[in-house]
Image (spheres, rainbow, N blue to C red):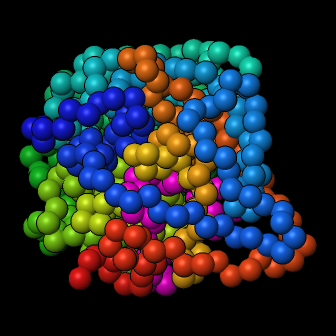
Amino acid sequence: MTNGCRNWGPTMLVGAVILIGTLAGCISESTTRLSRRVVIPEGKTYELAERREDLPDSPLITQTSMASSISVQALGTIPFDGFSLPVCSTGSGVQLVVTQTGTRPTLDMLLGANTNDGADCGISIYRCQDGTSPELVRSHVGGILLGRNANSDGCLVERLNPDGSRWIGLAPWDGGEIRWLVRNANINAFGWINEDGSLAYSSRRGDEERFRVVVRRRGEEPWALEEGLPYSWTFPTLVPSGTGLFALRLGDGFADLAWGSARSDAAFRETLELHRTSDRVDALRAWRTLSGTRGGAGVTENQLAWFSSELRRLVLWTPEARETSLFPGGTLAAARTTDPDQWLITSDRSLELAAMLQTTVATSLVFADPWTALPGTDGDSIILRATDVEGEIELARLRTSPFEPEAEPKAVEDRTDETNGDMPTRRGDPRRD
């Protein structure tokens, strides 16, 4: 890549800020700080979170923000390749985190190209508990690329084979051997696994240019989305229940987000909803569109958060309602909290709590540093950021607990971007006029 961006400092090396900001040429233009407004119920129950430059020295803090109580618990540091966002275990129980180690993945690896350059790639699994340093559970080496998500059994990985083929496997959280789920001569990439073991991934032969989607739902016959038109189907993403499937459909210079039933090829086509993301898409922009879904961030039962290169922010798509909503300008990553309307959003400057309301967005500052949030165990979020030490990333557990107000909250004032006047919520295609 020769985009000329060399801003690899700690504040940029966090999750989607790395994945989107650095590879996009860095979102670095100056913008006016937006005023923060919150839902204020009758009775003075809540307040804005105080500005913090970093996690506090004390191991536990509690603050109030939006309509939630927020507590943060430091979990220590783990190795970091300076690029790849870790993946966290979800469900319940001990928090486990897996990180990419060895040689930093190339763009060709991330895009599923015919390559065996990743012989030095590996992963390491860590057990993270409050009050203790992360404990190494197991490392896997030898062309192992960290996958997009995980379930309670383990984390998805991809193996780059010397012949250019690629397998998809599950690395158990308990440190056992990798269990290979897709093992053939094809290039199999962009896997997504659900809690019940249902799996979706893209696959193509080495002599093909376009990917097809393959879906294996537990207890049912697998099916593939065979495409007669010149489309390539990438980054398939199952909704938590496994009933619906998101994917990115690539054409000649354009890309569409797609959603449909995951039951079968026919059911997917019958229920298909499409949303044009851009008419100017190359491989990098296509990958960047859904890079923020890593670990399940930005994915709900009926919504998907995707990055718009034109708008330089995340957009929330609700396909069944055929609606889109804009996150605040500069939003690079988003993870929903236990409150269905509240998201932890990351820009290159901060981590904020945002309420995506019907006609507006209300935000409150959590940290004045670009921490990135990922889904964790027991409904908590794991927030992370690169430290000042090269090759190291810091982790913390963040918990939001909704209050029960005695009265209905008053109406929230509209939040308007003072730099361009855009309203944060639109219906239909969110591209600029």
* 106 is within the stretch colored magenta: no
Q: Quadrant of residue 245?
A: bottom left
Q: Residue at point 26% right, 52% down?
A: 29
In this rendering, the answer to whether 433 lies above or below 14 is: below
Q: 317 or 7, which lies in front?
A: 7
In percent of width and height, residue 209 lies at 11, 53
Residues 298 and 353: in front is 353
Asked if 153 appears above or below 430 in the picture, the reply is: above
Q: Is residue 335 magenta?
A: yes
**Bounds of the magenta segment:** 318-345
Q: Residue at x 43, y 20 (%)?
A: 388
Does 384 appear above or below 70?
above
> Which image quarter: residue 313?
bottom left
Lateral position of residue 124 relative to residue 73, left or right: left
Count the labels in the image: 0
Using the rendered image of the protein, determine whether residue 262 is visible from the camera's viewpoint: no
List x then y, in percent, for residue 93. Answer: 74, 35
Outermost right residue: 406
Q: Residue at x 61, y 67 (%)?
A: 37
Residue 271: which quarter of the image?
A: bottom left
Residue 265 position (above or below residue 21)? below
Give residue 341's position: percent from left, percent from top: 63, 68
User: Left or right of 185: which side holds 416?
Assistant: right
Residue shown at 48% from the left, 81% from the top: 320
- Image quarter where the C terminus lies is bottom left
Counting from the top left corner in percent of width and height, residue 231 is at 18, 66
